[in-house]
């Protein structure tokens, strides 16, 4: 989780512009996480990796972004 937050998440800011300590993962960040996981854990590369992500990621993002906010709270 620490790596996910450090590498891919975005920290929210309060009204004054200070870091809030709350982190979110937007669709772009989640896509990058998915690319890393598919490459490292499934050992997919090249077209196999691209095709797998194209076939799975959109439906999974829609499933987990239940409020259609465009981000997930980490």
Image (cartoon, rainbow, N blue to C red):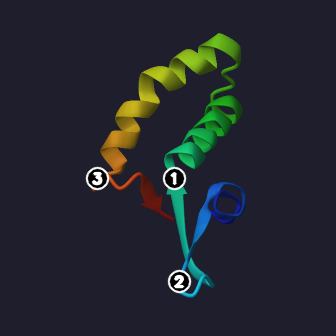
Vertical arrangement, residue 58 with respect to residue 50, above or below: below
- SS assignment at label 1: strand
Would you name the residue on which mark 1 appears?
26
Q: Say which mark, if any, is on residue 71.
A: none
Q: Position of residue 30 (x, y in %)?
A: 54, 46
Residue at image position (35%, 50%) is: 65
Q: Position of residue 19 (x, y in %)?
A: 63, 81
Which of the marked residues, 2 or 3, is nearer the chain's N terminus? Answer: 2
Q: Position of residue 1 (x, y in %)?
A: 62, 62
Vertical arrangement, residue 23 with respect to residue 53, above or below: below
Which of the marked residues, 1 or 3, is nearer the chain's N terminus? Answer: 1
Which of the marked residues, 2 or 1, is nearer the chain's N terminus? Answer: 2
Within-10-Å neighbours for mark 3: few <14, some 14–19, many 20+: few
Q: Say which mark, if any, is on residue 66.
A: 3
Tally of numbered discs: 3
Query: Rounded to the nearest whole Å, what is the CA distance between mark 2 and mark 1?
Result: 18 Å
Query: Rounded to the nearest whole Å, what is the CA distance between mark 2 and mark 3?
Result: 24 Å
Residue furthest to the front: 16
Residue at image position (40%, 32%) is: 58
Seen from the viewer's position, the closer of residues 47 and 27 is 27
Q: Position of residue 43 (x, y in %)?
A: 69, 25
Would you name the residue on which mark 2 appears?
14
The answer to whether 42 appears left or right of 54 in the picture is right
The answer to whether 3 appears left or right of 63 in the picture is right
């Amino acid at each position: 989780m620490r790596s996910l937050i450090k590498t891919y998440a975005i920290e929210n800011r309060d009204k004054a512009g200070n870091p809030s300590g709350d982190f979110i993962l937007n669709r772009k960040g989640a896509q990058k996480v998915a690319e890393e996981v598919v490459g490292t854990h499934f050992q997919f590369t090249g077209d196999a990796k691209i095709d797998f992500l194209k076939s799975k990621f959109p439906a999974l993002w829609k499933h987990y972004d239940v409020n259609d906010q465009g981000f997930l709270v980490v």
